[in-house]
Amino acid sequence: MLVNINELNLVAQQIIEQYADSRLFALEGEMGAGKTTFSKELCKVLGVVEEVNSPTFAIANVYPSAKVGEVFHFDFYRLNSVREALDIGLEDYLYSGNYCFMEWPALVLDYLPLPYVEIKILHTDSPDTREILTRVIS
């Protein structure tokens, strides 16, 4: 679907509702496509009130939500090996039952429990519009 960046909160709400039983979300897209921006909107929908920041350097950020408990936000861009992800306790996060939003997930895809939701964010000809595609990987 084509989405104006001003409608991201509405689209985030729709995705959370559409995939109500899902807790694992892999966000893919080129640099600057808006993965972190969209992760912020997903977190807002889930009741996260503190500022959501890119976990590029921390690898994992944990946000409390009175609505759903803890929400985990990952950025695997800087990792050189899957071992680094496992060393931060990735499997504990993935099997926690909490929401996990993962940017740059290619390195860890083989470790993700099935099913998970893939969200692709694609640039368009307009700087204010993105194409957002979702599907369940099972």
Image: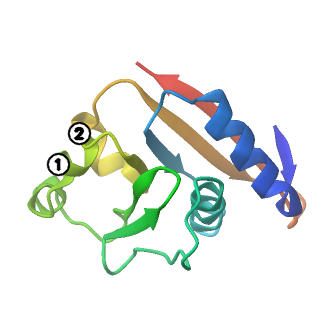
Q: Residue furthest top?
A: 138
Q: Residues within 10 Å of mark 2 (few under 14, many from 20)?
A: some
For the residue labelled by badge 1, is the local secondary structure a helix, a strand or a loop? helix
> What residue is shown with label 2?
95
Residue 112: percent from left, percent from top: 28, 36
Give the side of residue 14 with respect to residue 136, left or right. right
Circles 2 and 1, Cβ within 8 Å, touching? The answer is yes
Residue 54: percent from left, percent from top: 48, 75
Kind of residue at badge 1 = Asp
Residue 133 makes an appearance in the image = no
In terms of image quadrants, where is residue 73? bottom left
Q: Residue furthest front?
A: 66
Q: Is residue 33 above or below residue 92?
A: below
Q: Residue at left 20%, top 65%? A: 80
In terms of image quadrants, where is residue 36? bottom right
In terms of image quadrants, where is residue 119? top right
Residue 92's disc number: 1
Quarter of the image with the N terminus in it: top right
Q: Nearer the viewer, residue 86 or 44?
A: 44
Q: Residue at left 28%, top 30%? A: 113
Residue 5: percent from left, percent from top: 83, 62
Give the side of residue 61 with respect to residue 132, left or right. left
Numbered circles on residues, count:
2
Q: Nearer the viewer, residue 80 or 4?
A: 4
As measured in the structure, the alpha-carbon distance from the residue carrying label 2 to the one carrying label 1 is 5 Å
Q: Is residue 119 above or below residue 75?
A: above
Q: Residue at left 34%, top 62%? A: 76
Residue 105 makes an appearance in the image = yes
For the residue labelled by badge 2, is the local secondary structure a helix, a strand or a loop? loop
Quarter of the image with the C terminus in it: top left
